[in-house]
Amino acid sequence: MSSFDEMDAFEGATLSARAMAARPQPYLDGLNPAQRAAVEQMDGPVLMLAGAGTGKTKALTARIVHLMNTGRARPNEILAVTFTNKAAREMKTRVGHMLGQQVEGMPWLGTFHAICVKLLRRHAELVGLKSNFTILDTDDQLRLLKQLIRAENIDDKRWPARMLAGIIDGWKNRALTPDKVPAADAGLYNHRGTEVYDQYQRRLKELNAVDFGDLLLHMVTIFQTHPDILEQYQRWFKYILVDEYQDTNVAQYLWLRLLAQGHRNICCVGDDDQSIYGWRGAEVGNILRFETDFPGAHVVKLEQNYRSTPHILAAASGVIAGNEGRLGKTLWTEAEDGEKVRLIGHWDGEEEARWIGDEIEAMQRGTRGQDAISLDHMAILVRASHQMRAFEDRFLTIGLPYRVIGGPRFYERLEIRDAMAYFRVVTSPDDDLAFERIVNTPKRGLGDKAQQKIQVTAREHGTNLVEGARILLAHDGLGGKGGAQLRLLIDGIDRWGRMVGDEAMSHVELAEIILDESGYTGMWQNDKTPEAPGRLENLKELVKALEQFENLQGFLEHVSLIMDNESDDGGAKVSIMTLHAAKGLEFPAVFLPGWEDGLFPSQRSMDESGIKGLEEERRLAYVGITRAEAICTISFAANRRVFGQWQSSMPSRFIDELPEENVEVLTPPGLYGGGFGAAMPTSNLHDQAAEANVYNSPGWRRLQARAGERGMSQPKETRNVTIDMNAVSSFTMGERVFHQKFGYGAVIGIEGDKLEVEFEKAGTKKVVSRFLSGCDDVPF
DNA sequence: CGGCAAAACTTTTTT
DNA sequence: AGTTTTGCCG
């Protein structure tokens, strides 16, 4: 096995162990005792339980530096795994800073996926792949599955490809190859899941391609079936570090355990309270089981929080305390009290966005009696990305600069994916998916029929589509305009393919030639739609991005793994992102909108995963609150548009779990004579004064009253008890009612306190009765 | 075969 | 509501 010599030769450390051994250790001085313990306990298994804001990354990087500094390992003998590219980048930078020099010798610091690609390229043949395999993204994956499903005559209406993709991903996350799928799962996907999974894997091999899950799965397979190879890596990686260990899935866990079995120098860092990726296969059990898995493990708890005020910490602790089976940490801080967590209710999502926009502007000016806060130091963290639109709309109209983190990604755009498909066809001819994508883009008169002919020919000759097309043309199997166009395309692919190997030609130049000669650029130039110029702009950007890579292949790999693009043009901006994307970040001021039952906690999460789902949602709430350093503002809206339909909801149950002494309830400004509650005619009549305080609002009280009976279907009898305060709940079928937003209508259905109302203007809606009033009650 | 309109999804979170 | 897939017609 020569790959180990290569590892030395190509990725050798710039600093030898000996040269570093005598270095001073200033990086230890800034550490608290717990952090220091986590750094200095170098041998054997270590579990670093690091609560939010406890200086985890600091400890982790100090540990890496310490390992090198004390001569325990050279930089290239340390395996340091993260989940996101951002985390990897940050760690690399911080190690560099601590060392006071550029570290080039940490080739094995990266995401699980990036490291696995590197390994798999070396050993691809062991799982039936060539080392230049392509990595399919979810889009390609889905298209491939659709093809298979159609070929199998499965009704993809009843058994959607998405579902199958989810099932297969689930298996891969558990490191299950088709032959290892447990019998209990055999019934999935109409009893054909395993079968199609097997076919899918075969097809991937034919395409010389892998999906995300395969990267881990194949490496686990290789390690399990080739002990010699495993052993070499076990020896090579003297120390293993894992970030966000609570997010590892079974495959990642097995991978790590296999690699760590030799020397057992594995240090896992994580926080069971921040495990929020159960839906993509993460097993909190991995971190809970650590001491069993690695007997004699040293467990270090980082509990001193350097980020948030006591009120914020207490609020977060109050919420997370509702979860069972935690490892249990007690975060503490030396910080001063600061502001309480602020809570505010709004009439609808738009008002919420409006209020938050105003609030952000006030904070930015410092007119809230606070020091002015830069927009860069404020963030809005939402549960689901569709919540972002309301904020974007509002911020655009008031001209408030914002940035969306983790939004639609550059490389997912149509034109970028098309362009890349061209590059893929040229660099890896077996990539049929890429060929299918571009064969008729731009339009070449090659419709379904022509494409089918190519497919058939390719299948008959047992080759890829490019080759199939070539054969088809040679036999004059395709005449007319389409034939000529196909000829042109194939000739182009051949020509460009030759240029890939041409040393004199830069890959940037080549990319331009491909896009140009294929007519792809021209297609957008001739396009009169308003988005065409933007697309051309993006293509330019793509070519520019190419400059930073050695060749097309290198670029394609980067793209498939690095999906985050943080292009920033300087100015201060508010950040908008999902709670998931916010993990690991911190901001002086944080807004947490949309705390409504059904949205957060997400109904789907609870339906699909029950109490486990709810607990994960709760951890998400914990993550959200703990992102805030000084000001944390939670809000909810009584009404929101979902799927273009108005829907009312109640404050999140998590709001109930906030300790009252750490919360300040705000009253929305009197835009229409009072905010939440007061805007509702019914409540105006009955409980005006109390509406000012959410803790006294019907919604709140009802929430309290119902806290115990959550999750059960609403018994009809409780209806009057729970909404008694309003005394307007007894609607009858057919009754004429009024709704602030929808106007007049008639009751056509009653279900607990939710009424179905046919509105005269707004159509049929389901509305919670307290937002309705009988027409006699309307004071105008 | 291509273009347009109707219909049928969607919205949880992502390497 | 917005986006993607389908279905029909020229």
Image (spheres, coloured by chain):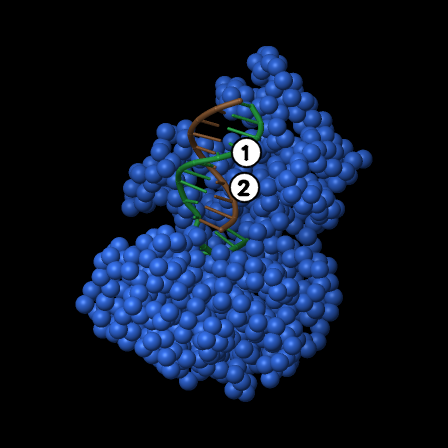
Chain colours: A blue, B green, C brown
Q: How many labels does the image show?
A: 2
Residue matched to label 1:
A433
Q: Is residue A649 above or below residue A469?
A: below
In the image, taking residue A120 as reference, residue A320 lies left or right, namely left
Q: Residue at position x 51%, y 24% from top?
A: A448
Quadrant in the picture for residue A707: bottom left
Secondary structure, mark 1, is helix
In the image, taking residue A690 as reference, residue A454 lies left or right, namely right
Q: Residue at position x 26%, y 73% from top?
A: A727
Dots 1 and 2 on the same chain: yes
The amino acid pointed to by label 2 is: Leu
In the image, taking residue A10 as reference, residue A780 lies left or right, namely left
Q: Residue at position x 59%, y 51% from top?
A: A409
Return the x and y of residue A357 as percentages of the image width and height: 57, 69
Q: In this view, does A403 lie above or below A345?
A: above
Mark 2 belongs to which subunit?
Answer: A
Mark 1 near mark 2, Cβ–Cβ under 8 Å?
yes
Q: Residue at position x 37%, y 43% from top?
A: A180
Say whether disc 1 or disc 2 marks the residue closer to the N-terminus: 2
Residue matched to label 2:
A136
